[in-house]
Amino acid sequence: MLVCVAACLSSAHTAAQAPNAAVPSSRVAADVIALTNAERTHHRRVVLRANRRLMRAAQLQADQMARARHMAHVLPGTRYPSTLDRIAAADYRWNSVGENVAFGQPNAARVLDSWMHSRGHRANILNANFTEMGAGYAVDRSGRPYYVQVFGRPQS
């Protein structure tokens, strides 16, 4: 069993600085997946398939973080406090999983740039063991964006 988690924080920002605030979360999530695969291709890794269950797990956490107005892998007191709780809720049968979370970046390109400049996040993004991924995006009531990537390799 392999579980990897990493978090990334951007400088404080306001809703006026958040061009994604009016963009549907599915569009931002799709951009995160496309940019993740561009990084993987650049580093000679195979692209990850988007998986609807991992998309659900990622969106669960993005929504929870936005409601709590707090970025963390573990959110005590929420319905799905840990990464493994969210993976189970999404009914994903896994061999290995990983999660990246971030807060405050104004768009998908900036969050990917932040993650790629962080050792733990970069390791998850480029991990050759992962074959699938999901992404989630939510904005809190102040307009602050939260991003989540969930990586996986299903049971065979």
Image (cartoon, helix red, strand yellow):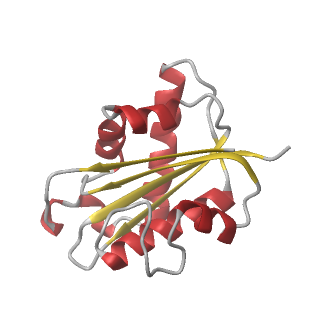
Q: Residue furthest top?
A: 44
**Is residue 152 placed above or below 145 in the rendered structure?**
above
Count of numbered marks:
0
Q: Is residue 63 left or right of residue 14?
A: right
Q: Nearer the viewer, residue 71 or 16?
A: 71
Q: Nearer the viewer, residue 39 or 130?
A: 130
Q: Residue furthest right?
A: 156
Residue 16 figure quarter = bottom left
**Is residue 87 placed above or below 2 in the rendered structure?**
below
User: Residue at 33% across / 77% down in the picture?
Assistant: 68
Percent coordinates x, y for residue 34 in the rendering: 50, 41
User: Residue at 37% across / 40% down in the picture?
Assistant: 112
Residue 152 in view (yes/no): no
Residue 21 figure quarter = bottom left
Placement of the N terminus among the 4 image quadrants:
top right
**Is residue 54 placed above or below 111 in the rendered structure?**
below
Placement of the C terminus among the 4 image quadrants:
top right
User: Residue at 51% across / 45% down in the picture?
Assistant: 33
User: Residue at 64% across / 62% down in the picture?
Assistant: 87
Residue 35 in view (yes/no): yes
Percent coordinates x, y for residue 137 in the rendering: 42, 62
Q: Is residue 48 left or right of residue 10?
A: right
Percent coordinates x, y for residue 74 in the rendering: 44, 65
